[in-house]
Structures are given as C-alpha cells and as structure tokens.
Image (cartoon, rainbow, N blue to C red):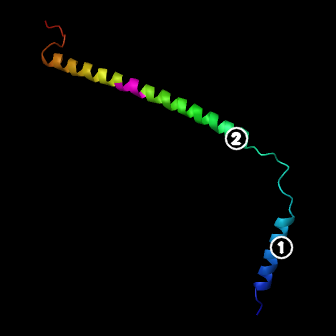
Amino acid sequence: MKTWLPYFGAVVVGLTLATALSPAQTSAPPQTPPVVATVTALAAAIQAQQAQIAANQALMSTKMTELAENVRQARIFARRGGGGGATQ
C-alpha cells in the first residue's frame, strides 16, 4: 500500500518553486488611474441621470394630480346634468 504523503509534498514543493521562480508581472503598467477616471466619469453621469429622473417624476406627479382634479370636476358636472348633450 503506497502512501500519498511523498507525492503531496513533491507537488507542494514544485508549486512553491514555480511560484517563486516565475517572473513578476512588471511588464504591464498599472492601469489604476484610467480605470478610476472612467469609473468616476460613469458615476457622475449616473448621478446626472438620476437627478433628471427625479425631476421627471416630480413633473409627472404634478400632471397626474392636475388630471385627477380635472376628471373629478368632469364627473361632478356630468352628475349635475351638464354633460353638454343636445336634446331634441
């Protein structure tokens, strides 16, 4: 019966050496500033859109209130017989 411990140890040592001997990733310059600038610009655009949406919602709410009042008044006049239909 073979034991797996020597094989496991060899794998661990091999991975450790491969990691230690691999060249560091210094060839690629850090791309943090462009990414940060892009994210900041997108966040500003989203905030502007949210402000526009809030303004539109307030305007729609005002118009719906006016429409509801007009419908209420029309129902009152229709009940009073002011429907405007010509009789013969």
Q: Nearer the viewer, residue 43 or 77?
A: 43
Give coordinates of residue 21: x percent, y percent.
87, 65
Q: Is residue 80 above or below residue 61?
A: above
Q: Which residue is mark 2?
A: 35
Residue 22, position as x, y percentages in the image? 86, 62
Q: CA distance from mark 2 to mark 1?
A: 36 Å
The amino acid on which the numbered mark 1 sits, given as a three-letter code, is Gly
Question: In the drawing, does residue 66 fall left or right of residue 1?
Answer: left
Residue 49, horizontal then vertical, whole percent: 53, 30
Q: Amino acid at mark 2?
A: Val
For marks 2 and 1 on the same chain, the one whose residue lies earlier in the sequence: 1
Q: Which residues are magenta?
A: 57-61
The residue under the point 84% across, 67% down is 18
- Label annotation for residue 14: 1
Answer left or right for 34 relative to 20: left
Q: Residue 88: which quarter of the image?
A: top left
Q: Residue furthest bottom?
A: 1
Q: Report which quarter residue 33 is drawn in.
A: top right
Q: At 64% from the left edge and 39% from the top edge, which residue is drawn?
A: 39
Q: Residue shown at 41%/28% (left/top)? A: 57
The secondary structure making up most of the magenta span is helix
Q: Is residue 58 magenta?
A: yes
In the image, 76 versus 32, the foreground residue is 32
Examine the rendered structure and indicate whether residue 40 appears above or below residue 2: above
